[in-house]
């Protein structure tokens, strides 16, 4: 489904209002990302998957919270959590 810029903007505004006061922690992470992708008219399942198993740089196994191969890697954190730690974790997966 091809959306106009105006439709994407309207959806983005609705999305931001809906999630403004939420803390999309682990219990709401999947709903948050599904809603985010729908801003662009893209069903998340068509392009990205949750809990993608990977090997970290140290050889241990791990899971990426959300992966759109070659495009987007997400380590989801609740509001107020350490983003530097999430960045380091994502970098280990690369």
Image (tube, rainbow, N blue to C red):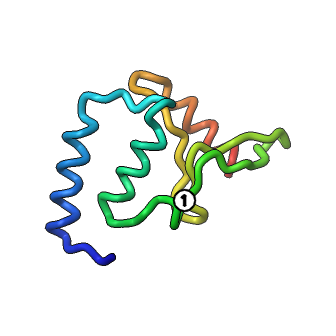
Decide if residue 19 is on the left or right side of residue 76: left
Which x, y percent locates residue 67? 58, 54
Decide if residue 68 is on the left or right side of residue 22: right
Q: Residue at x 36, y 52 (%)?
A: 36
Which x, y percent locates residue 17? 19, 40
Mark 1 Cα within 10 Å, few/some/many (few <14, many 20+)?
A: some
State the residue position of label 1: 48
Which x, y percent locates residue 13? 18, 50
Decide if residue 37 is on the left or right side of residue 72: left
Depth check: 71 or 13 in front?
13
Q: Residue at x 33, y 76 (%)?
A: 1
Q: Residue at x 56, y 49 (%)?
A: 66
Q: Residue at the far bottom: name it.
A: 2
Which x, y percent locates residue 65? 58, 43
Above or below, 88 against 36 in this view is: above
Depth check: 9 or 89 in front?
9
Numbered disc 1: secondary structure: loop
Q: Residue at the far right: name it.
A: 59
């Amino acid at each position: 489904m091809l959306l106009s810029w105006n439709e994407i903007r309207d959806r983005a505004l609705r999305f931001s209002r809906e999630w403004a006061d939420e803390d999309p922690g682990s219990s709401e992470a999947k709903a948050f990302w599904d809603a985010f992708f729908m801003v662009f008219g893209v069903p998340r399942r068509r392009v990205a998957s949750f809990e993608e198993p990977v090997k970290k740089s140290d050889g241990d196994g791990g899971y990426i919270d959300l992966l759109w191969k070659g495009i987007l890697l997400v380590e989801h954190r609740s509001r107020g959590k350490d983003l530097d730690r999430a960045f380091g974790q994502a970098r280990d997966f690369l």
